[in-house]
Amino acid sequence: MGIFTNGDRRILKEFLAKSEHNCHDIEKEIDEFLIDLQAEYEENSYVMNEFSEFVNELREKLPPSDANKLMEFSSRLARVKRCARKGVEALREIARDQRKMTRETFRDYEEYLHLG
């Protein structure tokens, strides 16, 4: 005799289908965010290089105190760029982990349903 009645098995299969649909929706949304974020990052990634070139040109024309302020500002912007890159990488990892977790969860459901 199985662990589940036919009614239990039907409810579990419905729950599996609903979970699968929800997980795929979440995966799709994460992937869309990742594509948008990557595109925006790549579209603007050149700005820091242009700004650095401009700073180097301008630095020589400024008094030392203003040149130091400009260099500090440039350094802070470089940190912002690194944070943006880390954000893209983090979202890529979240997308990968979500897909992996979804596969594992569905495999667990299938094993659980076959035991019953």
Image: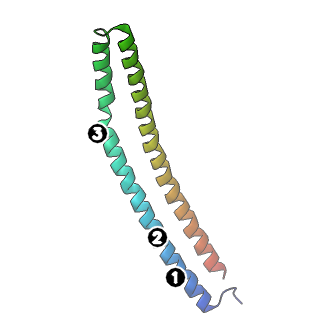
Residue 14: image x %, image y %?
51, 82
Q: Residue at x 57, y 63 (%)?
A: 104
Residue 5: image x %, image y %?
64, 90
> In the image as oriented, which residue stretches furthest toward the right?
1
Mark 2 residue element: helix
Of residues 26 and 72, the one drawn nearer to the viewer in this rendering: 72
Tell whether 104 sits left or right of 62.
right
Mark 3 residue element: helix
Query: CB of mark 3 within 8 Å of CB of mark 2?
Result: no
Q: Residue at x 45, y 72 (%)?
A: 21
Characterize the local packing of mark 3: few (<14), some (14-19) or many (20 or more) Cα atoms within 10 angstroms: few
Q: Earlier in the sequence, mark 3 or mark 2?
A: 2
Characterize the local packing of mark 2: few (<14), some (14-19) or many (20 or more) Cα atoms within 10 angstroms: few
Q: Which mark is residue 22?
A: 2
Amino acid type, callout 1:
Glu
Residue named by callout 1: 14
Characterize the local packing of mark 1: few (<14), some (14-19) or many (20 or more) Cα atoms within 10 angstroms: few
Q: Earlier in the sequence, mark 1 or mark 2?
A: 1
Query: CB of mark 3 within 8 Å of CB of mark 1?
Result: no
- Quarter of the image holding residue 55? top left
Amino acid type, callout 3:
Glu
Q: Is residue 68 above or below residue 89?
A: above
